[in-house]
Image (cartoon, grey):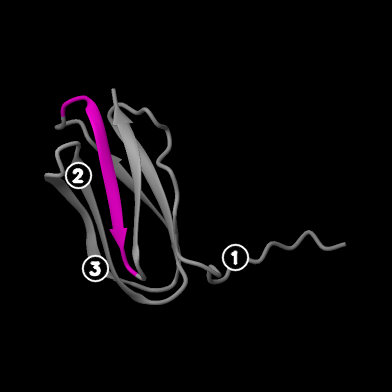
Amino acid sequence: MSNDVEVGIPEQYSLSQNYPNPFNPVTKIDYALSSDGRVNLTLYDISGRVVSNIINEFKTAGYYTVNVNASDLPSGIYFYIIRAVNLLSKKMLLN
């Protein structure tokens, strides 16, 4: 039995739920890219208005974590959407 852990390249594109959730004022978002490409991670308020463009750049395949500081935003429900291979979204709550 081997205790080796292989990290490598993710088998699939994914977006994790932010942690902690609810949060105040900082949270982290994990995502995985199974191939190289442009990544756009955007934060929206409940009305669908863009409040922050968190990432907009080319990334190589791999696992990523981004810290989001929402200290300048009011409490409420927000959505974050990643566009890379396809579109994925999650909901988060700022206390």
Pick the front one: 80 or 6:
80
Amino acid type shown at disc 2? Tyr
Amino acid type shown at disc 3? Glu
**Which of marks 3 and 1 precedes in the sequence?**
1
Task: Give me the C-alpha separation between circle 1 and circle 2.
Answer: 31 Å
Q: Looking at the image, which residue is at 40% across and 41% down?
A: 18
Foreground disc of the pair 1, 2 = 2
Q: Position of residue 40 (x, y in %)?
A: 25, 62
Q: Looking at the image, which residue is at 53% across and 68% down?
A: 10
Task: Give me the C-alpha separation between circle 1 and circle 3.
Answer: 23 Å
- Residue 81 lies within the magenta run: yes
- Residue extending furthest right? 1
- Residue 80 lies within the magenta run: yes
- Main SS category, magenta section: strand
**Which of marks 2 and 1 precedes in the sequence?**
1
- Residue extending furthest bottom? 36
